[in-house]
Amino acid sequence: MPLTRRRDIRVIAVILGDLLTPADPAAEGPDVAAVRPVLDRLNRLFDPALAEPFSVAPEGRIDGVLDDPAQSPLLVSVLREALAPSVVRVGIGVGFAATMRDGGDAYTNAREALALAARDRGLTRYVGTGDAGDVLLSAVCRLVDPLLQARTPKQWEAIAAYRELGHQRAVAARLGVTRQSIGDRLAAGHRRAVEDADAAVAAFLSYRQRERAAP
């Protein structure tokens, strides 16, 4: 889970997210009030890695800052699982910042990443890891986003419970279904593939962070 805070880290990740209005015209827009308790829990869980806590604006824009960019994939997945079936589009900007909220490149990168995700009708983009890195992570996102978009509410529910409980039997007991049903939902929701992609992105960001911090 989150790493211990390091005050000497100069590379940060700014995460901007938009709560998307459902496609159904009869559906209501983003429920901002319901998001605040989710962000409170997220802030407690990831407190060791936070540079700025996550908050939500009235129009549904979520933002926060991590000291450790490698925590971004895990945080975004936990956020999405907690908000599902509501959908959140995320842009992650990686860069240097001498002081928070200084208009540094990480914030510019995050806004660009969010705009790119919206342009491509995707859910996730990274900007600021270098030209080759951005291309690589964009390719990963283009592969993973359709898997997330195809998940059903029951699959999201099972995946979130599995992350918390860690055993299919415990998830089945909580949800009142069979263990086989939980296994089917986890498989259909591509839980393992998405977690493997998160781990790969985290490893790459960790490598880039060490590379940039080296004297």
Image (cartoon, rainbow, N blue to C red):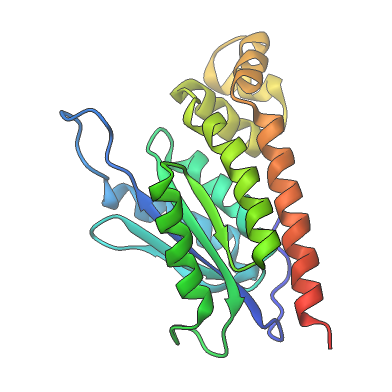
Could you tell me which quadrant the C terminus lies in?
bottom right
Q: Out of 34 and 25, give the one closest to the viewer.
A: 25
- The residue furthest left is 26
Q: Quadrant of residue 63?
A: bottom left
Q: Quadrant of residue 30?
A: top left
Q: Quadrant of residue 188?
A: top right
Q: Out of 164 and 142, give the one closest to the viewer.
A: 142
Image-based side of 151 in relation to 187, left or right: left
- Residue at horizontal 64%, vertical 68%? 49
- Residue at horizontal 40%, vertical 32%? 85
- Residue at horizontal 69%, vertical 75%? 5
Task: Determine whether 68 is above or below 156 in the image.
Answer: below
- Image spot of residue 171 (x, y percent): 62, 24
Image-based side of 169 in relation to 91, left or right: right
- Image spot of residue 97 (x, y percent): 57, 84
Task: Determine whether 35 is above or below 96 in the image.
Answer: above
Could you tell me which quadrant the N terminus lies in?
bottom right
Q: Out of 158 and 131, give the one closest to the viewer.
A: 131
- Residue at horizontal 52%, vertical 56%? 42
- Image spot of residue 161 (x, y percent): 58, 32
- Image spot of residue 34 (x, y percent): 32, 47
Image-based side of 84 in relation to 183, left or right: left
